[in-house]
Image: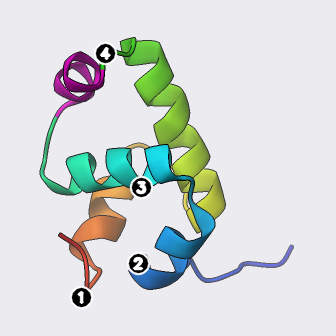
């Protein structure tokens, strides 16, 4: 099984949709799914789906992996 390195923050921004970038930015600001959903007038489930897709595109998985990945990025918010 091949293990690939997750994308860098800059690479991720190029691969993500504008909405995914917006959600990634809000996660980087330590906003909870409920807060993001309220601000964007979306359901919590939609935010969860976006977060899952972001993780897939970046190449990470697991609970809390997105937050950990953000903290490790030198160019994140």
Q: Main secondary structure of the magenta part?
A: helix
Contact flag, marks 3 and 4 (Cβ < 8 Å): no
Q: Which residue is mark 3?
A: 21
Report whether 27 appears left or right of 8. Answer: left
Residue in the image at 27% along x and 79% along y: 72
Say whether residue 1 is magenta. Answer: no
Give the left or right position of residue 55, taking residue 23 as reference: right
Task: Out of 45 and 5, give the one closest to the viewer.
Answer: 45
Residue bounds of the magenta highlight: 32-40
Proximity of marks 1 and 2: CB atoms separated by less than 8 Å: yes
Extreme-bottom residue of the structure: 74
Circle 3 SS class: helix
Q: CA distance from mark 1 to mark 3?
A: 16 Å
The residue where tag 2 is placed is 9
Mark 2 or mark 3, whichever is nearer to me: 3
User: Residue 48 occupies which quadrant of the picture?
Assistant: top left
The mark found on residue 41 in the picture is 4
Task: Residue 33: say if magenta.
Answer: yes
Say which of marks 4 and 2 sits in front.
Answer: 4
N-terminal label among 1 and 3: 3
Residue 76: image quadrant is: bottom left
Q: Is residue 75 visible?
A: yes
Give above or below for 47 relative to 44. below
């Amino acid at each position: 099984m091949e293990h690939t390195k997750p994308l860098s923050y800059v690479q991720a921004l190029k691969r993500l949709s504008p909405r995914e970038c917006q959600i990634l930015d809000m996660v980087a600001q330590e906003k909870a799914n409920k807060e993001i959903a309220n601000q964007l007038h979306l359901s919590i489930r939609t935010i969860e789906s976006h977060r899952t897709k972001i993780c897939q595109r970046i190449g990470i998985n697991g609970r809390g992996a997105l937050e950990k990945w953000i903290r490790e990025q030198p160019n994140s918010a």
